[in-house]
Image (spheres, rainbow, N blue to C red):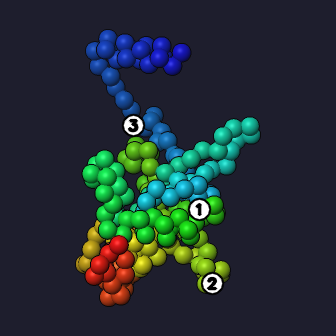
Amino acid sequence: EQFHLQSCVISALQNATSITINKDNIKMISILPATGSAKVKSVLSGDTVVLLGRAAEGGKAPEVTFTFERVTAPRMASKANNNVDDPEAFPSREWLRNLCVGKTVFFETRKQGATAGDRVYGLLFMPDPSDKTKQWNLSVESVRRGFCIPKVLGGDVDTDAADESAGYESALQVAYKEAVSNRAGVHSDKPL
């Protein structure tokens, strides 16, 4: 059935002389709501987790690949990098895995749908292990520990800007400077 439907659509497109698409009639498919909570199923790298949604009655729980916004972790071994981990890739993933697999986290989506491919980009939060009344921003904490680095380094962040991400950018830069000064993680003299 699905193949037949695809071939009908392809046939219709090939026979059309012109196609008009009205962007007002196209709805972006939201994978996740703007905010919410989900359980962490697994950790793919130091900046990417797989979240489990709530299963529909009698259905399978949906899985979503969620990547921290505006940070990058060392790459795990893959065919793209000759099956070699970047320095600190394994400790980065293991820190995040030990911290949140099987636990409920709170998310704030920033980018998803057509512009993000099959991933959701945003922020993940969980209770601070030392003070349960506070929330940890996991991407800021991973930068502070040297397991990730901000995608934009240096520069002054305008904290008075109306942009909602200014506070996040500022926190990333402060955490990055702290990690560099402490020689944490990827900033150590001899990373693992």
Nearest to the observer: residue 73 or residue 29: 73
User: At x 50% / y 58%, what residue is drawn?
Assistant: 43
Residue 131: mark: 2
C-alpha gap between disc 3 and disc 2: 47 Å
User: Left of 85 or right of it: where is 119?
Assistant: right
In front: label 2 or label 1: 1
Above or below: residue 67 compared with residue 114:
below
Residue beneath label 1, please? 101
Q: Which residue is mark 3?
A: 23
Q: Quadrant of residue 176?
A: bottom left
Earlier-in-chain disc, 1 versus 3? 3
Q: Is residue 162 visible?
A: no
Q: Nearer the viewer, mark 3 or mark 2?
A: 2
Residue sitting at x 32%, y 88%: 181
Q: Amino acid at mark 3?
A: Lys
Please tell me whether residue 172 is drawn above or below residue 106 in the rendered image: below
